[in-house]
Image (cartoon, helix red, strand yellow):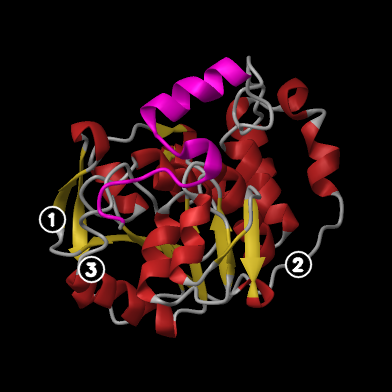
């Protein structure tokens, strides 16, 4: 799961020319995509928008980016699955998945994820991403916290999705820093010295610290990170490849939009949620 060649060996079906879907999309941008899919009408409207001049990222495409996604038991798959999909579309970018003990990790709902590397075996990360979870007992343990703090101290970019920001904050690395979090837990950040900001994407220190709100915000977060580091066109390419074109059937994704009775249902399930102070196992 750590690279495209492994994905191909595990059975990803090649498309024309012998390339896997992911490899083909990376190789030639929209030109390759249009040729392989038979292009004209499908890409007719999208091509002009993506052909426009766009802002450059802070990293040259020639500069490699090493991303470490730190997972743990009880973590939420979507918190990092969305960002992972975006990051895999970026040029010269390597994504590694690591956990405290390595191997397979049992996430939320019993999902078994792996095989992961050991955090202690990773010397450094260009970007570290800490996702959130329904149970933060494991990432709040001293051994895990020490590894996250070690990597965060030397990383060029320190990031989180959902209540993964609580894990980072508990290490002390977010003290005095602005950060996003899932709306139900956001005010817990201040208990660790971080500054809670109820936005879908938040950055501090000129982008060294970047965070996304709850769960699905991970895709918005990843696209913002992609645009900042690799440029707008690279981010737009990733967005098109994964067909991120959200059109939710209901406007109930945040308390500012949800009906009062629905908010009450969440508060019953997560006491304190509407005040941003819901409890999550592992957090005091």
Q: CA distance from mark 2 to mark 1?
A: 37 Å
Is residue 66 something that shows in the picture?
no
Q: CA distance from mark 2 to mark 3?
A: 35 Å
* Residue at (35, 31) in percent of width and height: 13
Nearer the camera: disc 1 or disc 3? 3
Q: Quadrant of residue 20?
A: top left
- Which residue matches tag 2? 56
Above or below 42: residue 31: below
Callout 1 crowding tier (Cα within 10 Å): few <14, some 14–19, many ≥20:
some
* Label 1–label 3 contact, CB within 8 A: no
Asked whether, in this view, residue 87 is left or right of residue 204, the answer is left
N-term-proximal mark, 1 vs 3: 1
N-term-proximal mark, 2 vs 1: 2
- Which residue matches tag 1? 103
Q: Nearer the viewer, residue 131 or 168?
A: 168
Q: Nearer the viewer, residue 121 or 212?
A: 212
* Residue at (31, 56) in percent of width and height: 283
Above or below 279: residue 122: below
N-term-proximal mark, 2 vs 3: 2
* Residue at (66, 52) in percent of width and height: 235
Above or below 79: residue 142: below
Asked whether, in this view, residue 100 is left or right of residue 219, the answer is left
Asked whether, in this view, residue 169 is left or right of residue 61, the answer is left
Q: Secondary structure at mark 3?
A: helix
109 is within the stretch colored magenta: no
Callout 2 crowding tier (Cα within 10 Å): few <14, some 14–19, many ≥20:
some
Nearer the camera: disc 2 or disc 3? 3
Above or below 152: residue 184: above
Q: Which residues are magenta?
A: 260-283
User: Residue 150's x, y, as percent?
Assistant: 32, 81
- Which residue matches tag 3? 144
């Amino acid at each position: 799961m750590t690279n495209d060649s492994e994905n191909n060996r595990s059975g990803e079906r090649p498309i024309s020319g012998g390339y896997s879907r992911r490899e083909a999309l990376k190789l030639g941008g929209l030109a390759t995509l249009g040729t392989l899919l038979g292009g004209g009408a499908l890409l007719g409207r999208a091509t002009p928008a993506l052909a426009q001049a766009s802002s450059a990222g802070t990293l040259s495409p020639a500069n490699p980016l090493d991303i470490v996604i730190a997972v743990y038991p009880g973590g939420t798959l979507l918190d990092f699955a969305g960002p992972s999909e975006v990051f895999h579309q970026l040029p010269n970018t390597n994504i590694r998945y690591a956990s405290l003990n390595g191997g397979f990790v049992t996430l939320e709902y019993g999902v078994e994820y792996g095989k992961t590397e050991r955090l202690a075996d990773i010397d450094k990360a260009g970007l570290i991403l800490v996702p959130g979870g329904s149970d933060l007992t494991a990432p709040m343990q001293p051994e895990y916290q020490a590894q996250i703090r070690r990597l965060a101290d030397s990383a060029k970019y320190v990031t989180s999705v959902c209540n993964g920001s609580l894990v980072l904050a508990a290490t002390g690395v977010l003290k005095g820093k602005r950060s996003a979090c899932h709306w139900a837990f956001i005010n817990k950040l201040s208990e660790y010295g971080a500054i809670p900001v109820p936005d879908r994407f938040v950055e501090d220190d000129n982008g060294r610290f970047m965070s996304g709100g709850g769960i699905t915000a991970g895709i918005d977060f990843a696209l913002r990170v992609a645009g900042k580091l690799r440029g707008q066109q690279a981010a737009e390419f990733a967005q098109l490849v994964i067909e991120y074109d959200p059109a939710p059937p209901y406007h109930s994704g945040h308390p500012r939009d949800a009906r009062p009775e629905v908010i009450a249902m969440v508060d019953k399930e997560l006491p304190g949620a509407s005040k941003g102070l819901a409890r999550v196992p592992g957090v005091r």
